[in-house]
Image (cartoon, rainbow, N blue to C red):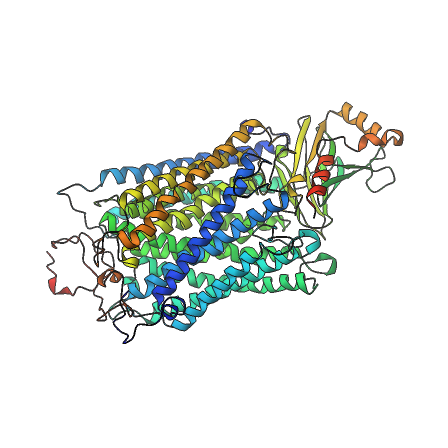
Amino acid sequence: MLQRFLTGASSYSHSVDHLIFLVAAIVGFWLLAAEGALFWLMFKFRHREGRGPQYITGEEKHLTRWISIPHSLVILCDIVIIVYAVTVWVNIKQTLPPAGQTVRIYGQQWTWSFQQPGPDGVLDTADDIRTVGELHVRAGTTYHFELVSRDTVHSFSVPAFRLKQDALPGRVITGWFLPTRPGTYDIQCTQMCGLGHALMAARVVVETPQEHAAWLQRASNPSLAAQTVPPATAVAPAIATVAEVRP
Amino acid sequence: MSTQLHAAEPGIFRKYLWSTDHKIISMQYLFTGMVMGLVGGYLAYVFRMQLAFPNRDVPGFGLVTPGKYNALVTMHGTIMIFWVAMPVLVAAFGNFLIPLMIGCDDMAFPRINRLSYQIFFFSTVVLLSSFLVKGGAFGGSWTAYPPLSAKGAYNLTPAGASLWLIAVVLEFVAFLLGGVNFVVTAMNGRAPGMKMYDLPMVVWLIVLASIMFMASVGPLVAGAVMLLFDQTLATGFYDPARGGDPLLWQHLFWFFGHPEVYVVLLPAIGIVADVLAVFARKKLFGYRTILYTAWATAVLSFVVWAHHQFIAGIDPRMANIFSITTLIISIPIAEMVFVYIATLYGGSIRFTTPMLWALAFIAEFLIGGVTGIFLGASGADIYLHDTYFVIAHFHYTFVPIAVIGTFAGLTFWYPKMFGRMMNETLGKIHFWGTIVGFNVVFIPLFITGAAGDQRRVYNYALFPEQARPELQHLRTLSTIGLLVMLASQLPFLFNFIWSLRHGERAEANPWRSNTLEWTVASPPPHGNFAEMPTVYRGPYEYGTPGRSEDYWPQNVPDEVLQRP
């Protein structure tokens, strides 16, 4: 269902979409049933001359049935939703499949920046690739991320991945994603982080292995380093706009 | 207003501004809340215009810069919850109704009551003054997460942030004083014969809301003092660089913040219960069921707070526990709604303006209730958290509470408050405009939220997935809905003011209702009851078999009983 609004591009985006669809189906049924009952009773028991109200305390057994049966059904629906929701949650947030690659993500007022291993495949070495506002990842590879904030609370959100995680100063939060569909997708900040909150845009570029290898070569070649600074629409105007509004 | 109990007429100042009469204090809260409601509505108008027509001058405001946008949304949220919903639903209705409905001459502590309003008024002045200080009003959202809220270097509104915090704490103090009064009065001031199960539902639920408020606000006041110290004395309670923890604030805030939702919900559903019973001419379907489900909701609401923090960096295992408790709370709430709907069964429904509001409350609150399940389901919240889906969801709870529930109560008790009837035609224009407008505002926002629109963003130009024209059309549609909704308040304001002088005079009991406030003159004199009433039965004896009248006031003795 969610696919119609926004493409999914990670290994778990379908499970989130299915969960949302399941919840929509269940609560949709209850909403229609309850609204239907409400409007039907409003119509049926509208005031008419010569017909007074009935005296019903609501404690009669044959009437409380109308409450207790739906009540039990609601419990049943809750259990189904909880089981599915927890399953999806545990998969995304509590398990950590083996990493093919690790990337460190920095949030700060008001940019996202990224640190990835260079050709040696090891993070925190001299050939690390650092980018601002643009994250390049390889489709089909499981990524671990280490999420860090340098100032306030930010939230790293990639709607196409169905991924969202707050970044907290003073902590390193680890998580994972597995991009599946090549393309370029939005990265948002979804936690109020001050004046430039709306300007904290970045892009994640999901590449095929060949494209990614080519990017890696370009990015780790110092003579071409200028290209790693994104010409992106995102960051440059963002900074300009903030400069304008700063007092 | 007549003052038979006093030999001399007090001056204007003593009568209206320094009064200890619960009815005057109720009006003070009501009018302050209504004025703040206009302010909150104006703020919503400005930022929704910016979202619909980005970067163009908003008529009546000017250009909305990012900093101003942040301040607008922050103050809109703060004002609507703490300066509109709380003073109107809890304080205004609580003050007006509790003594009158339990057959008492005033609050247990009238002067504490006066102090409560005075502190509240002061908090209002502090809050509004923050618009005028250097840097402008606080823009760190109504949740005020540190370190953003703690450091002027981050939020760029150091004075606004501290004033915001001081105003909120003062407001809490005011409602603590008011809450103590409500609970003590309802426990000790009831008329002879009135048992706890004879209390009108609205009194019960305002008392329960007051208890919840008192039980939840303490940690947040402590947290707010720590935050104020972080802001002004350079302490480090929430600063990780100095051993503090920003998550601590989030826990303290939401431990209060979630019960707070129910603090304003309970009075609204109490109002709806009373209005439903009167205009369906029906006894409530299972008085005790409503009461017990309300208690269950109140207790459970203290153990669901971390569902606001699923992805905030808490231990992910905790999300499972809070997802379960959150879904469990749907059980008593669903049962309560079923009982309300069942109350209509066998009724003789009169679609007066208050009844329309009460029925709309149920119809709209249902949408708010079921969409909460999406967000309580932890796995789905990963995607929907902090999107417009959340905004649409909680406005489908808060608007039924603070707008629809309030209008149900105001139109219902207006004759008692002011001694005049409101105009029904204007009332219905107001009702339909508000309801249609409200749905046009928020149904599109469910869709933009599901499409990934994140909150608190003044312009989506930098986000290609959100800057799609079809989403922009929905945002514009939502803003049009808001304009309709706001314009529809004009007939209400006219009706409210015009009817004060020109409305048809209200008799003591125009709705043929059972509860005690309708046994005294409209408006009630100082001291309320010329002769203190005695109570013989519960508040919802409508359509009792064997009686010629279809209602049976609580204070009418049993002698007229002719049980078949």
In the foreground, B386 or B306: B386
Q: Quadrant of the C terminus of chain B?
A: bottom left
Q: Is residue A110 above or below residue B103?
A: above
Would you say B403 lies left or right of B502 here? right
Quarter of the rendering containing residue B449: top right
Quarter of the rendering containing residue B549: bottom left
Quarter of the rendering containing residue B101: bottom left
In the foreground, B322 or B119: B119
Residue occupying image coordinates x 50% and y 59% = B124
Observer able to see residue B334: yes
Residue occupying image coordinates x 66% and y 26% = A181
**Residue B82 place in picture, x, y as percent:** 49, 56
Q: Is residue A88 above or below residue B76?
A: above
**Residue B59 place in picture, x, y as percent:** 52, 40
In the foreground, A211 or B80: B80
Q: Is residue B424 above or below residue B108?
A: above
Would you say B104 lies left or right of B319 here? left
The residue positioned farthest toward the top in the image shown: A210
Observer able to see residue B272: no
Would you say A173 lies left or right of B11 here? right
**Residue B471 place in picture, x, y as percent:** 54, 30
**Residue B491 place in picture, x, y as percent:** 35, 44
Q: Quadrant of the N terminus of chain B?
A: bottom left
The residue positioned farthest toward the front in the image shown: B11
Q: Is residue B139 above or below residue A116?
A: below
Residue occupying image coordinates x 36% and y 64% = B24
